[in-house]
Image (tube, helix red, strand yellow):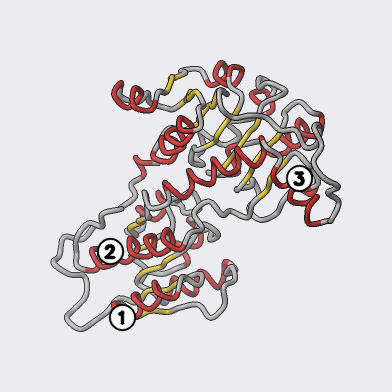
Amino acid sequence: MPNSPTLFPAGHRPRVALTRRLPEEVERRMAELFDLAPRGEDTRLKPGEMVALMQASDVLVPTVTDRIDAAMMADAGDRLRLIANYGAGIDHIDVEAARARGIAVTNTPGVMTEDTADMALALILAVARRIPEGLAEMQAGNWNGWSPTALLGRRIGGRQLGILGMGRIGQAVARRARAFGMSVHYHNRRRLRPEIEEELGATWWDSLDRMLGHVDIVSVNAPHTPSTYHLLNARRLKLMKPTSVVVNTSRGEVIDENALTRMLRAGEIAGAGLDVFERGHEINPRLRALPNVVLLPHMGSATVEGRLEMGEKAIINIRTWADGHRPPDLVLPSML
């Protein structure tokens, strides 16, 4: 990062380009502070369009839907100096390539923690209690009244929850799970401090394989990195109980989606709640057809409050960088 007091002369505002439409309040604030290039349509940019935007901007504000690789940055020229990601995940950005070209990368961590944890619990309840099936029956006008054996789900109180990835969101899920009477287990790269384990009532498993065979529900809260790609592969999914449920609100690539689909169809896993998918918005049609699966369109962080806080963090990162200082949410390769 440059150490100069400011990167721009007095009166000059950095050119900031958006790749998607952001909430009106966020765009208005950015336009007040920067030379903003907003999007007219909320559509995904093609690679060539993205490169052209990078060539004409000091700062790019992408989202999780934008793939920014080394080749694109090599074609972008020398003007771009900051990628201020609107979101916490940065697996869609080649951070190493950006660093090599002198491009800083920032993100917006922390603001989506509570919202995503809420969605994880919502998916657990929706799958365990078969809420979408009941909703579909009501909307179709097929309900003929209460029955002792209709749409029987599973109680979540007293069940064993296994959390894969015990960062901010994983810990927030654990707090909610305890309030519902669940026992909390977790697997993480590093064990939590004893006082945090005690607060969460969480049991650490150094072996993911052993934890998967023990728990009733698995909540995936791990980022997508080379080491977590297909972490829940076919072999590991087979270790789970036939009555178990998988919920994923982090990154679709962590689960082998084809293997999960086969096991759900065969009744080897009882159900799944997925807010993210291995191939983005391209959903396996076999997965979509299953009655024991709840699919959501990446809604985990979709609250008004969360989106505004993401925008505020992005603005702070841009302003701090433009003033010649280290942005508070600078992403380093060692953090990946």
The structure residue drawn at horizontal position 23% and vertical position 64%, both measured from the top left corner, is: 320
Q: CA distance from mark 3 to mark 2?
A: 44 Å
Horizontal and vertical percent position of residue 3: 16, 60
Horizontal and vertical percent position of residue 105: 36, 56
* Nearest the eye: 131 or 302: 131
Residue type at the position of mark 2:
Ile
* Nearest the eye: 168 or 124: 124
Q: CA distance from mark 2 to mark 1?
A: 13 Å
Horizontal and vertical percent position of residue 23: 46, 71
Which residue matches tag 2?
Answer: 316
Which residue matches tag 1?
Answer: 32
Residue type at the position of mark 1:
Glu
* Nearest the eye: 53 or 262: 262
Examine the rendered structure and indicate whether residue 302 appears above or below residue 32.
Answer: above
The structure residue drawn at horizontal position 54% and vertical position 46%, both measured from the top left corner, is: 119
Which residue matches tag 3?
Answer: 133
Evaluate if marks 2 and 1 touch, with contact meaning CB atoms under 8 Å apart. Answer: no
Examine the rendered structure and indicate whether residue 168 appears above or below residue 309.
Answer: above
Location of the C terminus by quadrant is: top left
- Of callouts 1 and 3, which one flags the residue occurring earlier in the amino acid sequence? 1
The structure residue drawn at horizontal position 69% and vertical position 44%, both measured from the top left corner, is: 131
The kind of secondary structure element at disc 3 is helix
Examine the rendered structure and indicate whether residue 175 appears above or below residue 37.
Answer: above
The structure residue drawn at horizontal position 57% and vertical position 44%, both measured from the top left corner, is: 122
Q: Is residue 331 left or right of residue 270?
A: left
Numbered label attached to residue 183: none
Residue 83 seen: no
Horizontal and vertical percent position of residue 235: 67, 23
> Of the residues tagged 1 and 3, which is closer to the observer?
3
